[in-house]
Image (cartoon, helix red, strand yellow):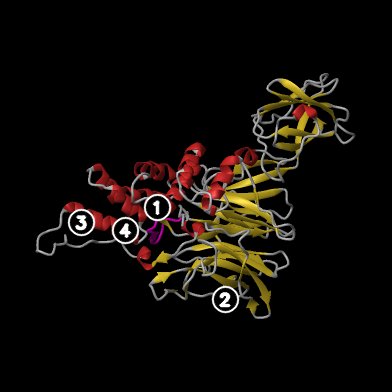
């Protein structure tokens, strides 16, 4: 299972050893004859112990020392590559995988992981070469998903709706901030921004807590003294007019850390309700269907408050973590039902979000995609076709935690595309506005970024109506609005489409100033809006 900076979002088990002080190896061990074991053997044993205890940062330090001293065999380099995967460092993971990819210790799982690492680094052809050497590539769902991605990369970069992404001010440098959820007039999100208390041994980062920010997302404060603990709190979902919630937390209640028979502390879902007397959240209890031996998390609740979607690694699934549905009943929440193999894969599905039109958004690394986690959408009342949301929502990094505002005009997504996990605001525009300035007035027209990106947001491919666009298999639709500097519509304006400097289309805006034009996916082209008495407007789209 792929683990990255924010442990809770990739959703794995937490060993009790994560919460203790650093491992102390004690006196140097002796061999069976009473002699001292070599320093090399001692360091290797310590490194392997860190690795097996999921303390990957510590393991990396020791494995790296062994490599520098020329004491590392292929097994050490392979564990070093795997450790870098776990702490979400695909650059170094690729480096060490590349050194051992032809080793007899490489398994099909390693080949798949190496290919995913290359995808995360944007090295698509190299990923194809790795998959092509995999003996069972044509029958393995994981490799088939990668091949499918590589065969239609253009589709992920072009579509009919423009999105503009901006990092929000509330993100704190060098810390993880992710998975925002609408709460009244603001948002609740997950963050590692505190330095107090124990650190998570997996990647030596602070444990995660819930924070609240106002709608301007300029600053943050802890969301709840009662909900936040000294271990992990994760994604939360509200219902019944924000008076109740389901949230993710390490198995920790009443100052007691819960463990399985194997000594494992899992992630759990808890219910809570607002307590007027405490002026805080209270009545915290494990959700009624929990089995302690498995992990549960990442809740989202339908707008009618009757359906709970979440993830779990419980038995009976299709891979690492699967999406499940629980329906509300008189006693709480009903028995979970796996959402099936159309949605769930042999990889990890996580971070579901359900909107008011029954569109389910979720993150996955099992359906192919641009690399890392990608965000997908499926209409649960429709034909159950899964759609990759495309660039720039998805990138070669991990992209997850999609949330749509009630208006539908703004959304939020979490991504580590710029370093640690950050929250990005998405402004959704159905139309491309092209503002024309009147020739007779010396007016400054607001600048529009001339590098406009067409994004994946509807079914592809579409078919061209014009013979001029023959030869382009994948076409996308732009709905353009042509207006003047006073935001007045301009009818009978021209909109030209040029591909490689050659005019392909020349259309006229209607009475509402609207023009619908089809453009080729993955091609460089130019749009020129013009009207007599106005200055031309040119937008180049690479």
List x then y, in percent, for residue 224: 55, 65
| Mark 3 surroundings within 10 Å by alpha-carbon count, few (fewer than 14), some (14 through 19), many (20 or more) | some
> Tag on residue 50?
4
Residue 156 lies left or right of residue 435; in this view the side is left
The residue singled out by tag 3 in the image is 42
Compared with 295, 476 (above or below) is above
List x then y, in percent, for residue 493: 85, 27
Q: Is residue 485 visible?
A: no
Residue 59 in magenta stretch: no
Rounded to the nearest angstrom, the CA distance separating label 2 from label 1 is 37 Å
In the depicted view, which residue is nearer to us: 101 or 199? 101
Rounded to the nearest angstrom, the CA distance separating label 4 from label 2 is 34 Å
In the depicted view, which residue is nearer to us: 30 or 132? 132
Q: Is residue 57 visible?
A: yes
Is the C-beta separation of discs 3 and 2 under 8 Å?
no
Rounded to the nearest angstrom, the CA distance separating label 3 from label 2 is 45 Å
Mark before the other along the chain sequence, 2 or 1: 1
Q: Which residues are magenta?
A: 194-202
Rounded to the nearest angstrom, the CA distance separating label 4 from label 1 is 22 Å
The residue singled out by tag 2 in the image is 289
| Mark 2 surroundings within 10 Å by alpha-carbon count, few (fewer than 14), some (14 through 19), many (20 or more) | few
| Mark 1 surroundings within 10 Å by alpha-carbon count, few (fewer than 14), some (14 through 19), many (20 or more) | few
The residue singled out by tag 1 in the image is 107
Q: Quadrant of residue 333?
A: bottom right
SS at badge 2: loop
Is the C-beta separation of discs 4 and 2 under 8 Å?
no
């Amino acid at each position: 299972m792929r683990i990255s900076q924010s442990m809770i979002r990739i959703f794995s088990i937490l060993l009790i050893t994560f919460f203790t002080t650093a491992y102390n190896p004690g006196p140097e061990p002796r061999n069976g004859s009473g002699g001292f074991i070599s320093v090399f053997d001692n360091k290797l044993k310590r490194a392997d112990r860190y690795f097996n205890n999921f303390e990957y940062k510590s393991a990396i330090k020791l494995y790296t020392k062994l490599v520098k001293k020329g004491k590392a065999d292929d097994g050490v380099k392979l564990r070093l590559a795997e450790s870098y995967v776990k702490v979400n460092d695909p650059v170094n993971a690729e480096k060490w995988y590349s050194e051992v990819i032809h080793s007899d210790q490489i398994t099909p799982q390693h080949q798949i992981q190496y290919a995913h690492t290359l995808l995360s680094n944007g090295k698509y052809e190299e990923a194809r070469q790795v998959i092509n050497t995999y003996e069972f590539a044509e029958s393995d769902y994981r490799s088939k998903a990668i091949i499918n991605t590589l065969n239609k990369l253009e589709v992920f970069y072009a579509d009919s709706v423009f999105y503009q992404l901006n990092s929000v001010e509330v993100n704190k440098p060098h810390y993880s901030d992710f998975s925002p959820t609408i709460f009244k007039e603001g948002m609740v999100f997950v963050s590692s921004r505190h330095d107090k208390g124990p650190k998570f041994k997996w990647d030596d980062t602070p444990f995660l807590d819930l924070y609240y920010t106002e709608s301007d997302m300029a600053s943050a404060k802890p969301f709840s003294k009662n909900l936040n603990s000294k271990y992990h709190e994760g994604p939360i979902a509200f219902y019944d007019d924000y008076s109740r919630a389901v949230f993710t937390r390490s198995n920790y209640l009443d100052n007691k850390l819960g463990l399985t028979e194997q000594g494992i502390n899992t992630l759990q879902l808890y219910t809570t309700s607002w307590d007027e007397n405490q002026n805080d959240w209270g009545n915290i209890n494990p959700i009624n269907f929990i089995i302690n031996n498995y992990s549960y998390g990442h809740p989202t609740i339908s707008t009618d408050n009757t359906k709970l979607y979440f993830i779990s690694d419980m038995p009976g699934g299709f891979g690492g973590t699967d999406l499940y549905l629980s329906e509300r009943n008189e006693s709480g929440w009903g028995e979970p039902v796996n959402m099936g193999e159309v949605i769930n894969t042999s990889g990890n599905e996580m971070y579901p979000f359900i909107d008011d039109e029954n569109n389910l958004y979720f993150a996955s690394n099992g359906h192919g995609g641009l690399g890392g986690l990608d965000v997908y959408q499926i209409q649960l009342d429709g034909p159950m076709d899964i759609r990759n949301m495309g660039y720039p929502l998805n990138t070669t990094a991990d992209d997850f935690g999609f949330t749509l505002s009630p208006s539908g005009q703004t959304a939020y997504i979490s991504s580590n595309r710029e370093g640690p996990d950050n929250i990005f605001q998405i402004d959704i525009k159905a139309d491309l506005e092209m503002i024309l300035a009147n020739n007779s007035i010396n007016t400054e027209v607001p600048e529009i970024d001339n590098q406009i990106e067409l994004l994946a947001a509807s079914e592809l491919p579409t078919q061209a109506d014009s013979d001029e666009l023959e030869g382009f298999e994948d076409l996308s639709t732009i709905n353009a609005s042509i207006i003047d500097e006073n935001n007045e519509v301009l009818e009978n304006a021209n909109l030209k489409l040029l591909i490689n400097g050659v005019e392909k289309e020349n259309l006229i805006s209607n009475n509402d100033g609207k023009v619908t034009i089809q453009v080729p996916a993955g091609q460089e082209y130019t749009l020129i809006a013009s009207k007599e008495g106005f200055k031309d407007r040119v937008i180049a789209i690479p």
